[in-house]
Amino acid sequence: MPNAKVLNEKAAVVAALEERIKNAQAGVLVDYRGITVAEDTELRNELRKNGVEYGVVKNTMVRRALDDLNLAELDKVLNGNTSLATATDDPIVPVRLLSEAAKKLGEEKFHIKAAFVEGKVLSQSEIAQFATLSSKSDLYAQLVGTLMAPVANLAAVVDAIANKGGEAAAE
């Protein structure tokens, strides 16, 4: 029988996972086998750079956290080597980046087991659709560009009107 210290440590790990998952807009569970240290380092750096928390997790601990958060349907994918990626800012980023990694590294070495967005478990087809979406920052940039396009020449139009008015006054 485990001692109280070990039980407390496990409870703390589960509580931290629950908090991480609860605060995440999106989470992705991946299976990895045989990726090199260099590939793992490159992936971790890319994820970190984009605000995604990523790391290897113990299936039993994640299972407890998911059960407590009413995401027990994800239990079925918790086998083998599992990593968890979570993002609190943009739900599209972890799904897209990990889908790209799976394509680059090969599905036999690295694949997405499951994903959830704002507490909803995604189907494999929904994961594939999410992977094709633009990130929030890309969408904001497109929106700003779209909104600014009609007024892009506004300064020139105002100047032309002002100059035309000045010419009319001179006559």
Image: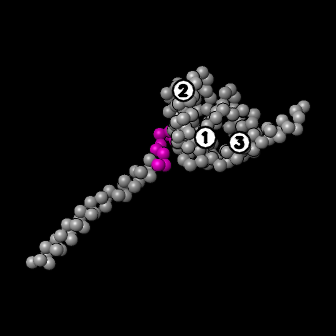
Disc 3 is placed on an element classified as helix
**Element under disc 2:** helix
Query: What residue lies at 40% left-to-right and 55% top-to-bottom?
Result: 144
Q: Which residues are magenta?
A: 129-137
Using the image, determine if residue 71 lies above or below residue 171.
above
Residue extending furthest toward the top? 34
Residue furthest toward the left? 171
Badge 2 vs badge 3, beta-carbon distance below 8 Å: no
Relative side of 5 to 95, left or right: right
Residue matched to label 1: 53
Which badge, 1 or 3, comes first in the chain's sequence? 3
Image spot of residue 1 (x, y percent): 90, 31
Q: Which mark is residue 17?
A: 3
On screen, 100 above or below 140? above
Q: N-terminal of the two: label 2 or label 1?
A: 2
Q: Secondary structure at mark 1?
A: strand
- Residue tagged 2: 39
Q: Position of residue 116 (x, y in %)?
A: 61, 42
Q: CA distance from mark 2 to mark 3?
A: 25 Å
Q: Nearer the viewer, residue 77 or 37?
A: 37
Q: Is residue 66 above or below residue 168?
A: above
